[in-house]
Amino acid sequence: MDTFLNHKILPDFLNRMESLILLGGEEIPSFTRIYKHEELIAESSNEVEKNSDSSFHSEILCLRDAKEKIGTRYLPECLLITSLEPCLMCAGTILLSRIPKVIYLLPAKQGEGISSLSIETIYSRNFFPELICIPAEMSKEAFKSFFKARRKKFN
Ligand SMILES: [Zn+2]
């Protein structure tokens, strides 16, 4: 699985993310894919602006889509990969979906992401996903330039 991650999932993810970044747009460059074993099941980008709904994060949309395709409410054989560490809202949905492996390419600020969940929260559940941060320059740059452009717009 790890070889597949390094040689297939990660490069494919970065390629796709690069082409999405080039398209630009209003949305934060959050992009998520879910794989079951080695098969791509779902892929989503944020749709917060498009739907004027602050809960339309790429992780939530991707989990919803994957569940619909697989036809179950749990995703125990899946892996989720996303450009930015999932926020606490998405962390809740990830836990409820029982997805065992979560990979992200940019850590969130302290206290804002899934890795900041308290030990009590983790131990009070009989399930918690393995979290893997694989820092990617592309993701860092994408978010940096997104927020820079946004600051220009609103100042
Ligand atoms: Zn989120």
Image (tube, helix red, strand yellow):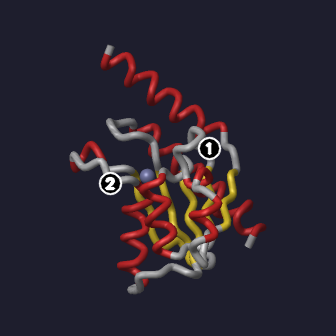
Q: Does residue 77 sit above or below 45 in this rendering?
A: below
Mark 1 residue type: Pro
List x then y, in percent, for residue 128: 61, 70
Q: Secondary structure at mark 1?
A: loop
Q: Is residue 121 left or right of residue 49?
A: right
| Rendered image: mark on residue 151 | none
Q: Secondary structure at mark 2?
A: loop
Q: Which residue does the image show at 66% across and 43% down from the upper left? A: 136
How many other residues sit within 10 Å of disc 2, few (<14), some (14-19) or many (≥20)? some
The quadrant of the picture occupied by the N terminus is bottom right
Choose between 67 and 54: the one closer to the eye.
Answer: 54
Which residue corresponds to mark 2? 56
Q: Does residue 48 sit above or below 39 in this rendering?
A: above
Q: Is residue 62 left or right of residue 109?
A: left
Q: Which residue does the image show at 40% across and 78% down from the upper left? A: 67
How many other residues sit within 10 Å of disc 1, few (<14), some (14-19) or many (≥20)? some
Which picture quadrant has residue 147? top left
Which picture quadrant has residue 152? top left
Which residue corresponds to mark 1? 107
